[in-house]
């Protein structure tokens, strides 16, 4: 039985990854999960300089999910390379660095710095709904997405994954735009913009007013969009959005994802990523699946 | 576990857990609700530990669906918990000194284990909404207790600072947990008196392990982890010296 998957020439021991922003740099979950067991760690977004993020409250629970408006707080690429990258290099897992920026130049600066490292892949965040400049501004219109994708592709030494927003009219068109501009893969979905109002305080639950919805509440939307994207492009799709167990992960694989990432549910069950790995193996054994690639896109 | 209601909406739960032996005053644990629509762990401070019987006590107020679920648990039930989280109150900073241990409302519970362990001249100042007090008898065993209540039904009418002023109390160090307006007033008082104040802060959080960056507080200096003026309450806190944080 093999659980190996290959995305843009990078081989992963299994398709289970950690969705950006829900797993820190891996360090925070190291005492719960054997990082060596994971296909890859996708890091929290990294910018060219430290970002302070949004005011609190930054998180709020909603039915079956949560809203967040962290605002991409991060210590910047220098600290990432000195501390988080060095930490992750100790493990036998692939490193995918999520890159964020306010301008194309910001992204390119981080991409170039990462080009000097042994980071395995880059995931470009053009879909965070919680910052005013950059991020989602590049991911909601095909022209902007094509521009940033091709600029990054010119400078990147590693394969480039464009992380797409669900807050668009046609996810297939966005995936095609990324593919046409040189993306090596796409990942989706980022969070869905939402809002919560505290009726007792008559105030927004988040200081940012709106936030990104994640968790099991968004899973059906994510599965549908992964299916649409996978059928629109030839490049691999990495699926994410509300995965709470191995069954959910398998659903994404069947919809067409070549790999999957566990996100908000890491907060609910810090052991989850490893449980998904073993759960996928148990499913394969139960149904006599010898190669996980048989599952990818098996439901047409 | 065992549990009883000790005041309106306030519950007193003892959990049998091996976390009890390690728990320090001012640390907290996270409880995970069983209801799947309420996903996130609920941070609740350690009220007391019982090393002989390996039990950890929490006292909490019903604030939403998660805590409402916890309040229905009965002896013999189990719940998933994560802990012990955070750094707790620095005991050495108050050793041998004249100290205020201040708790306001549902910030009172962590003061109990602090009062048990702190070797100091302890003046415990408690703020309640009204005469529905809780943990009062437990706390009276570990220091002199001064009370304020918002409606004046017990102790000084007003808040904990009103009680301190009305009774002319003095201290060389402060430990406190309670609502933000109380903590701001204590910071102002500590600044004016030129004494340290160790404040236990609270913020909405998603993970409890330092990954989500939900529970940050603005800091005076650049934080060593974030490299911006934000520290994580779950990991760098929940207790901060008042002058370190912008509250």
Image (tube, coloured by chain):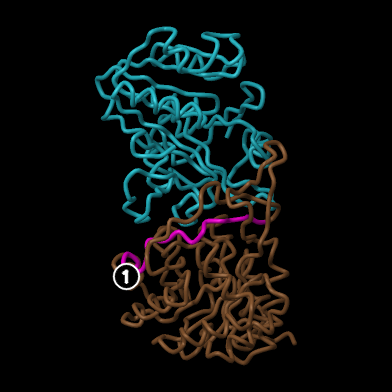
- In terms of depth relative to the viewer, which is nearer, A215 or B54? A215
* Quadrant hosting residue A230: bottom right
* Region rendered in magenta: A65-81
Q: How many marks?
A: 1
Q: Is residue A49 visible?
A: yes
Image quadrant in which the C terminus of chain A is located: bottom right
Q: Residue placed at 34% from the left, 81% from the top?
A: A118
| Tag 1 secondary structure | helix
> Residue A150, image x and y in percent?
50, 87
Pick the front one: A150 or A258: A150
Quarter of the image with the N terminus of chain A in it: bottom right
Residue B203 magenta: no
Q: Residues within 10 Å of mark 1 (few under 14, many from 20)?
A: some
| Quadrant in the picture for residue B10 | top right
Whether A224 is drawn above or below B138: the answer is below
Q: Position of residue A188 (x, y in %)?
A: 61, 75
| Letter of the chain that mark 1 sits on in the rendering | A
Query: In the displayed structure, does residue A109 sit left or right of residue A38?
Result: left
**Rendered residue at 63%/33% (across/down):** B75
**Position of B51 relative to A38 (above/below):** above
Disc 1 designates what residue?
A81
Above or below residue A55? Residue A213 is below
Residue A299 appears left or right of A233: right
Judging from the image, what is the letter of the chain drawn in brown? Answer: A
Q: Colour of chain B?
A: cyan
Looking at the picture, how far across and down is residue A202, in whole percent?
70, 39
The reply, left or right, for residue B54 in relation to residue B97 is right
Q: Position of residue A104 (x, y in %)?
A: 47, 77
In this view, which residue lies farthest toward the left? Answer: B96
**Residue visible at 32% across and 46% down?**
B221
């Amino acid at each position: 039985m093999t659980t190996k998957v290959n995305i843009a020439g990078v081989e992963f021991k299994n398709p289970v990854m950690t969705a950006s922003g829900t797993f820190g740099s891996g360090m925070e979950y190291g005492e719960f999960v054997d990082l060596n067991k994971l296909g890859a760690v996708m890091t929290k977004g990294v910018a060219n300089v430290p970002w302070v993020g949004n005011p609190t409250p930054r998180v709020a629970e909603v039915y079956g999910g949560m809203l967040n408006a962290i605002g991409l707080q991060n210590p910047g690429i220098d600290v990432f390379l000195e501390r988080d990258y060095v930490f992750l290099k100790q493990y036998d897992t692939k490193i995918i660095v999520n890159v964020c920026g306010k301008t194309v130049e910001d992204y390119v600066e981080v991409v170039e710095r990462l080009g000097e490292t042994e980071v395995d892949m880059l995931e470009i965040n053009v879909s965070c709904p919680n910052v005013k400049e950059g991020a989602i501004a590049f991911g909601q219109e095909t022209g902007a997405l094509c521009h940033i994708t091709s600029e990054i592709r010119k400078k990147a030494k590693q394969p480039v994954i464009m992380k797409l927003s669900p807050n668009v009219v046609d996810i297939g068109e966005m995936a095609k735009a990324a593919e046409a501009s040189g993306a090596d893969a796409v990942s989706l979905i980022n969070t869905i913009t939402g809002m919560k109002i505290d009726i007792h305080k008559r105030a927004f639950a988040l200081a940012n007013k709106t936030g990104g919805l994640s968790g099991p509440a968004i899973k059906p939307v994510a599965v549908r969009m992964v299916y649409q994207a996978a059928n629109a492009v030839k490049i691999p799709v990495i699926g994410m959005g509300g995965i709470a167990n191995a069954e959910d992960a398998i659903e994404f694989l069947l919809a067409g994802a070549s790999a999957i990432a566990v996100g908000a549910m890491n907060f609910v069950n810090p052991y989850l990523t490893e449980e998904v790995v073993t759960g996928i193996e148990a499913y394969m054994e139960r149904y006599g699946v010898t190669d996980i690639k048989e599952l990818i896109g098996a439901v047409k | 576990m065992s549990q009883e209601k000790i005041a309106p909406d306030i519950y007193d739960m003892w959990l049998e857990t091996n976390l009890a032996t390690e728990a320090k005053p001012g640390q907290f644990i996270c409880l995970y609700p069983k209801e799947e629509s309420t996903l996130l762990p609920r941070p609740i401070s350690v009220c007391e530990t019982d090393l002989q019987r390996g039990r950890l006590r929490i006292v909490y107020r019903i604030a939403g669906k998660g805590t409402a679920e916890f309040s229905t648990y009965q002896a013999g039930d189990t719940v998933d918990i994560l802990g012990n989280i955070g750094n707790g109150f620095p005991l050495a900073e108050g050793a041998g000194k004249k100290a205020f241990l201040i708790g306001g409302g549902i910030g009172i519970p962590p003061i109990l284990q602090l009062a048990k362990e702190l070797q100091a001249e302890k003046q415990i100042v408690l703020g309640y909404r009204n005469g529905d007090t809780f943990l009062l008898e437990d706390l009276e065993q570990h220091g002199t207790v001064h009370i304020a209540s918002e409606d004046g039904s017990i102790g000084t009418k007003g808040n904990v600072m009103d009680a301190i002023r009305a009774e002319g109390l003095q201290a060389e160090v402060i430990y406190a947990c309670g609502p933000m307006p109380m903590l701001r007033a204590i910071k102002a008082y500590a600044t004016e008196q030129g004494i340290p104040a160790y404040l236990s802060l609270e913020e909405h959080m998603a993970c409890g392990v330092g990954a989500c960056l939900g529970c940050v507080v603005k800091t005076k200096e650049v934080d060593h982890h974030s490299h911006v003026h934000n520290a994580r309450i779950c990991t760098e806190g929940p207790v901060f010296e008042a002058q370190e944080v912008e509250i």
